[in-house]
C-alpha cells in the first residue's frame, strides 16, 4: 500500500493570538500536519469544525463568548467522532476544568507550559506532547516495522492466535467509549469469556490486579473499575499517565463513582483488598513485599517511555513481589508503555489481558502487548470489568482481613 500523502487537518481554538500562532507553528513543523483554521473563541471554533470537518481539534478551555467545555458539548451534539484535544493549565483548577471537558466529550489533553518556562523549552514541551497525540488520534502513529504485522484476536474475548483478525466491532465515537453491541459469534465469545474467565487464567489464582492506561484512560477506568464489587478480595494498583494534579482528582472522582475504595498512592501504605491505589503523577509506583504484606512504594527514578509514573515500572515490581499471582490489564493508550514489564509478568506466569482495538481511543499500549504475543485475552472495554469481577471472584490476598470487615470499613 502506498504511503498516505494527505495531511492531517487541524483546527486550533484559543483566545490568545500568540498561543494560536505558537500552536500553529509547532503543529506545522510536522510536514504531515496542516492547520486549516484558527478561532479566537469557542463559538467560532464550533463553526469552523462544522464547516471544515478537520481530523483533529485543539481547544483552549477558558475563552470569551463560549468556553472550551461548552464548545465541546456543542460539537458533540452533531459530531461524536472528531478527536478534540484540550489545551489545559497545569493547576488544580485547570485539572478540574479538563475533567469537565473530558466528561463533555473531549478525547485527550495537553498541559500548557508554566509561565516560568523559557520560550524555547516551552515550545519543545508543547511539540513533544502535542504532535504525537495529533498523529495518533488521526491514525498516523509510528509506522510498524516493515514485514511484521501485529497479531490480532480471532474472536472477542478469545485467546490470541497469530495471523488471525478480530471480529469487526463498532468504532469509538469521539472519546465517548460506546458500549459494544455484540451479535452472533462475537456475542457467544464474550459470553463464554464472562462465564468462564477464571478457567482462562493462565497463572495461579490472582492475589493482585494491576491496570495500566493512558490516552482514553480517564473514561475507560470508571467503566472497568466501576464493575468491581465493594467486597473485592484483592488489592488493585493503577498507573494512568497524568500529572499529579490530575491523578489526585482522578482518584477522587473514581472513589465517588466506584463501589471499591479508590485512593491516591501513599508511600509505604499497605495494599488492602477492595482498595484501588492510583499512582501519583510525577512519581513511579512500585509494589513491594515487606513483612509478608504488599505495600506501595513511590520513587523518583528516571522516566521510562517518557512517562513517570510508567506502567513498565509497576508491572516489573509486581512481577517481583507477587510473581504469577497477578492479573494485569492494559487499556487504551498511546505508545508501548507496559509491554516490557508485561514480559516479566509473563515469565513469572501471570495473566495478561488487553483492550481491543475497536473500543480503544488509541490502540498503542494494548496493541503493543498484542503485537508482542503477550496478551492471553483481548476484549472490548465494556466486557473487561465484568470479566474481571468474574475472574477475581473468590480470589484472596494472602493474609487479607475478612471481607465483612472491609465492607464495614467502607460503610
Image: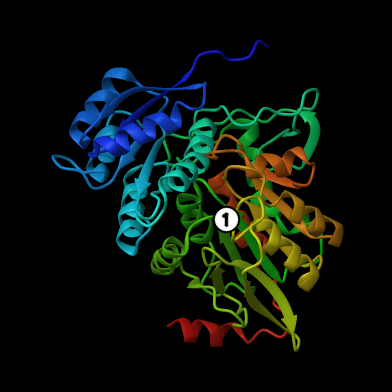
Q: Indicate the quadrant where residue 351 lies.
A: bottom right
Quarter that holds the N terminus: top right
Q: Nearer the viewer, residue 313 or 218?
A: 313
Image position of 81 with respect to 240: above or below: above
Query: How many tags in the picture?
Result: 1
Residue 190, image x, y percentages = 63, 43
Residue 281 is at least partly visible in this image: yes
Mark 1: give few (<14), some (14-19) or many (20+) Cα within 10 Å: many
Residue 105, image x, y percentages = 35, 42
Residue 176, image x, y percentages = 41, 41
Residue 327, image x, y percentages = 71, 61
Q: Specify whether 154 is left or right of 211.
A: right
Q: Indicate the quadrant where residue 235 lies.
A: bottom right
Residue 202 is at least partly visible in this image: no
Image position of 192 with respect to 199: above or below: above
Quarter that holds the C terminus: bottom left
Q: Secondary structure at mark 1?
A: helix
Residue at 57%, 75% (x, y): give it.
274
Image position of 381 with respect to 116: above or below: above
Q: Specify whether 163 is left or right of 96.
A: right
Residue at 28%, 27% (x, y): give it.
38
Q: Nearer the viewer, residue 88 or 225?
A: 88
Residue at 44%, 30% (x, y): give it.
27
The residue at which mark 1 appears reads as 386
Q: Nearer the viewer, residue 411 or 236?
A: 236
Q: Specify whether 72 is left or right of 254.
A: left
Residue at 38%, 49% (x, y): give it.
112
Q: Going by the picture, which residue comes out furthest to the top?
A: 2
Amino acid at each position: 500500500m502506498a504511503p498516505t500523502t494527505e495531511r492531517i487537518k487541524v483546527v486550533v481554538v484559543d483566545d490568545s493570538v500568540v498561543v494560536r500562532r505558537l500552536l500553529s507553528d509547532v503543529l506545522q513543523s510536522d510536514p504531515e500536519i496542516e492547520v486549516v483554521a484558527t478561532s479566537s473563541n469557542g463559538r467560532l471554533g464550533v463553526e469552523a469544525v462544522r464547516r471544515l470537518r478537520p481530523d483533529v481539534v485543539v481547544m483552549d478551555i477558558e475563552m470569551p463568548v463560549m468556553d472550551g467545555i461548552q464548545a465541546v458539548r456543542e460539537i458533540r451534539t452533531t459530531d461524536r467522532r472528531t478527536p478534540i484535544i484540550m489545551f489545559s493549565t497545569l493547576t488544580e483548577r485547570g485539572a478540574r476544568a479538563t475533567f469537565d471537558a473530558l466528561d463533555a466529550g473531549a478525547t485527550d489533553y495537553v498541559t500548557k507550559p508554566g509561565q516560568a518556562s523559557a520560550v524555547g523549552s516551552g515550545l519543545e514541551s508543547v511539540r513533544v506532547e502535542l504532535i504525537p497525540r495529533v498523529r495518533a488520534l488521526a491514525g498516523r502513529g509510528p509506522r510498524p516495522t516493515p514485514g511484521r504485522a501485529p497479531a490480532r484476536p480471532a474472536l472477542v474475548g478469545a485467546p490470541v492466535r497469530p495471523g488471525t483478525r478480530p471480529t469487526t466491532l463498532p468504532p469509538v465515537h469521539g472519546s465517548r467509549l460506546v458500549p459494544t453491541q455484540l451479535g452472533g459469534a462475537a456475542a457467544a465469545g464474550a459470553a463464554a469469556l464472562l462465564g468462564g474467565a477464571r478457567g482462562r487464567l493462565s497463572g495461579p489464582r490472582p492475589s493482585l490486579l494491576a491496570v495500566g492506561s493512558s490516552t482514553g484512560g480517564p473514561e475507560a477506568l470508571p467503566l472497568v473499575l466501576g464493575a468491581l464489587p465493594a467486597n473485592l478480595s484483592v488489592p488493585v494498583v493503577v498507573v494512568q499517565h497524568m500529572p499529579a494534579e490530575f491523578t489526585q482528582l482522578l482518584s477522587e472522582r473514581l472513589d465517588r463513582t466506584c463501589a471499591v475504595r479508590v485512593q491516591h498512592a501513599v508511600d509505604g501504605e499497605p495494599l488492602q483488598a477492595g482498595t484501588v491505589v492510583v499512582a501519583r503523577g510525577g512519581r513511579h509506583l512500585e509494589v513491594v513485599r515487606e513483612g509478608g504484606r504488599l505495600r506501595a512504594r513511590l520513587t523518583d527514578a528516571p522516566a521510562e517511555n517518557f512517562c513517570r509514573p510508567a506502567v513498565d515500572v509497576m508491572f516489573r515490581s509486581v512481577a517481583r513481589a507477587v510473581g504469577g499471582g497477578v492479573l494485569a490489564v492494559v487499556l487504551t493508550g498511546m505508545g508501548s508503555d507496559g509491554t516490557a514489564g508485561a514480559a516479566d509478568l509473563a515469565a513469572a506466569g501471570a495473566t495478561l489481558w488487553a483492550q481491543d482495538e475497536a473500543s480503544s481511543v488509541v490502540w498503542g499500549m494494548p496493541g503493543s502487548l498484542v503485537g508482542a504475543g503477550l496478551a492471553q485475552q483481548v476484549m472490548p472495554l465494556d466486557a473487561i470489568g465484568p470479566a474481571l469481577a468474574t475472574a477475581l471472584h473468590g480470589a484472596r490476598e494472602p493474609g487479607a482481613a475478612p471481607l465483612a470487615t472491609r465492607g464495614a470499613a467502607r460503610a
